[in-house]
Image: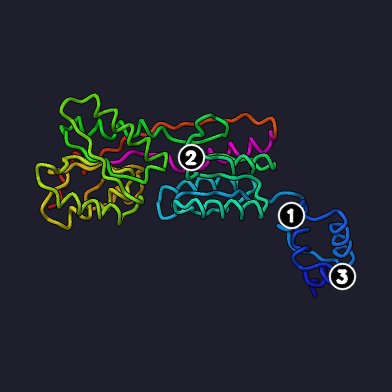
């Protein structure tokens, strides 16, 4: 019969929690206690599993990945790319979603530290990287995903979201749309800020064009539906003739609201552009023009960078990968598939 942790604790004269600390966090236990528990383990022949042995060696064969929203197919594609590359190198990926909550993000980082992950991939909530500095200083490499680090203090794999916002709104302007709405939020998310900046840059250089910002609390289909209903309630003269949504989920919600109303057509009355190029955008009742991010490639590249940092240790060079987004034009801006 396998020896239990409780038996090890009794043999060493310590608590079960102390045995767990010796196995998982020996740095918080005195050397004398570590020696006692180790002796008990050897005497009783206690063996956990391969993961535990890796933890006692100081690391696991797992990478921790924190994304903003697991409900967004874009982040699932990023995770898939990361998982595939990790498996090719003998690692797995443990994914958690912060759900745009700083508290949840911190809890996930705590868990990953306790699990002794070999590295952390994260799409962080804000630009205060103090916690990430501590993780790296403890010997665990950290790579930012889907956003840059600003001062290049961390390696990052991101997309030029300012350019993405620019090409989205330039497309609407080129179609003759002048009263354009940007839908997205919260602005605490850097990607949303940058997409708005790109949109603003086009409007600033276009005569007679205006940009209305319709903020959202989240980047979800339901939030998009609410904005769509708000647009329907506007006076015709105030209503936008073009919409740039900060992601495809918002665009889908907006499209649903407009289609269900039966009073406006897409793209006849309102041209609509999303962002991310998720599968649902192409299969919508009116396929949605969108800005493509190479999601799986982002995930693969992030793991490659993390592996290089882990190998280089203290001598690691902070790499900065920035992908250029591409516009994918569909019927929501130029097609004949109007929704009435």
Locate residue 298, reporting x and y percent: 48, 39
At x 52%, y 51%, the residue is 105
Residue 179 vertical position relative to residue 12 in the rendered view, above or below: above
State the image quarter where residue 194 is shown: top left
Residue 111's x, y, as percent? 61, 55
> Which residue corresponds to the image point at 30% horizontal and 46% vertical from the top-left?
215
**Can residue 133 be seen?**
yes
Say if 17 sits above or below 72 in the image.
below
Mark 1 or mark 2: which is in front? Answer: 1
Q: Position of residue 291 (x, y in %)?
A: 33, 38
Q: Which residue is mark 2?
A: 298
Category of crowding for the residue at label 2, using alpha-carbon neighbours closer than 10 angstroms: few (below 14), some (14–19), many (at least 20) = many
Residue at 61 percent across and 53 percent down: it is 110
Between 68 and 118, the one lying in front of the other is 68
Q: Which residues are magenta?
A: 289-313
In the rendered image, the quadrant that contains the N terminus is bottom right
Name the residue beneath numbered marker 3: 11
Q: Secondary structure at mark 1?
A: loop
Mark 3, secondary structure of its residue: helix
Q: Which residue is mark 1?
A: 25
């Amino acid at each position: 019969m396998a020896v239990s942790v409780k038996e090890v604790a009794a043999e060493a004269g310590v608590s079960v929690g102390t045995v767990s600390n010796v196995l998982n966090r020996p740095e918080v236990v005195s050397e004398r206690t570590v020696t006692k528990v180790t002796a008990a383990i050897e005497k009783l022949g206690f063996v956990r599993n391969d993961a535990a042995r890796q933890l006692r060696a100081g690391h696991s064969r797992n990478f921790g990945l924190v994304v903003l929203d697991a409900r967004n197919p874009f982040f699932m594609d990023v995770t898939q790319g990361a998982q595939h590359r990790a498996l090719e190198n003998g690692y797995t990926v443990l994914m958690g979603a912060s759900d745009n909550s700083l508290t949840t993000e911190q809890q996930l980082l705590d868990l990953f530290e306790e699990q002794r992950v070999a590295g952390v991939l994260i799409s962080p909530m804000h630009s205060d990287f103090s916690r990430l500095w501590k993780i790296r200083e403890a010997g665990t490499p950290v790579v930012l995903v889907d956003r840059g680090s600003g001062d290049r203090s961390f390696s990052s794999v991101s997309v030029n979201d300012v350019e993405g916002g620019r090409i989205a709104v330039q497309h609407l302007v080129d179609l003759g749309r002048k009263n354009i709405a940007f839908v997205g939020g919260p602005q605490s998310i850097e990607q949303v800020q940058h997409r708005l900046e790109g949109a603003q840059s086009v409007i600033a250089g276009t005569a007679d064009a205006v940009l209305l910002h319709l903020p959202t609390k989240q980047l979800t289909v339901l939030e998009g539906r609410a904005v769509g209903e708000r647009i329907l309630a506007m006076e015709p003269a105030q209503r936008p003739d073009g919409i740039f949504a900060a992601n495809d989920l918002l665009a889908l919600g907006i499209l649903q609201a407009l289609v269900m109303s039966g009073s406006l057509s897409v793209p006849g009355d309102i041209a609509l552009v999303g962002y991310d190029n998720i599968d649902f955008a192409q299969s919508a009742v009116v396929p949605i023009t969108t800005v493509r991010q190479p999601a799986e490639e982002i995930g693969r590249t992030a793991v490659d960078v993390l592996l290089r940092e882990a190998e280089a240790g203290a001598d690691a060079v902070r790499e900065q990968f920035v992908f250029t987004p591409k516009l994918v034009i569909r019927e929501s801006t130029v097609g004949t598939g109007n929704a009435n």
